[in-house]
Image (cartoon, rainbow, N blue to C red):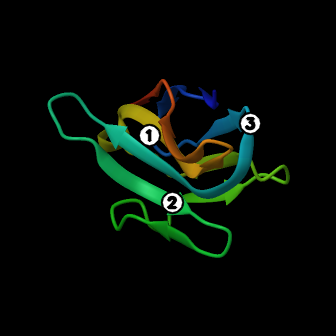
Amino acid sequence: QVQLVESGGGLVQAGGSLRLSCEASGPILNINVMAWYRQAPGKQRELVGHVTTTVTNMAESVKGRFTIVRGNARNTAYLQMNSLKPEDTAVYYCKVNGRHYGGPFEYWGQGTQVTVSS
């Protein structure tokens, strides 16, 4: 069973920074994509960005402020968030796509709250 553990959320003032972590564990053969989504109250979940082995893409709303970095262990990903704005307040979720011995998988993390005060 693949498990995802997220950490790093919290309360920060506008203009501040936070780094979220996502670590996948279990019988993983390879990870193709690690992505971050967020969902603000009353809104649909939206893609923040994703990273593969070769490409990193970020949503226009966060480009230039947020970035995703894969860890050296390749089963971790970090969402570095700088110049945070109150509208970035949301629950942030990690999603991982890859393969384990049973075939392809997709798992979501439990979510971590990010609150940006003005």
Q: Residue at x 35, y 34 (%)?
A: 89
Viewer-closest of 79 and 53: 53
Q: Which amino acid is tagged 1?
A: Ala
Q: Position of residue 18 (x, y in %)?
A: 59, 39
Q: Which amino acid is tagged 3?
A: Pro
Q: Which residue is mark 2?
A: 50
Q: Which amino acid is tagged 2?
A: His
Quadrant of the drawing holding the C terminus: top left
Circle 3 or circle 2, nearest the eye: 3
What is the secondary structure assignment of the residue under circle 3?
A: loop
Q: Residue at x 36, y 41 (%)?
A: 38
Left or right of residue 89: residue 114: right
Is residue 71 in sight in this rendering? Answer: yes
What is the secondary structure assignment of the residue under circle 2?
A: strand
Against 42, residue 55 (above or below) is below
Q: Which mark is residue 14?
A: 1
Against 27, residue 110 (above or below) is above
Is residue 81 in sight in this rendering? Answer: no
Q: Residue at x 85, y 54 (%)?
A: 72
N-terminal of the two: label 1 or label 3?
A: 1
Q: Residues within 10 Å of mark 1 (few under 14, many from 20)?
A: some
Left or right of residue 94: residue 59: left
Circle 1 or circle 3, nearest the eye: 3
- Where on the picture, by quarter, is residue 16? top right
Residue lying farthest to the left in this orientation: 42
Circle 2 or circle 1, nearest the eye: 2
Q: Which residue is mark 3?
A: 27
N-terminal of the two: label 3 or label 2?
A: 3
N-terminal of the two: label 2 or label 1?
A: 1
Left or right of residue 14: residue 102: right
Cβ–Cβ under 8 Å for marks 1 and 3: no
Residue lying farthest to the front in this orientation: 102
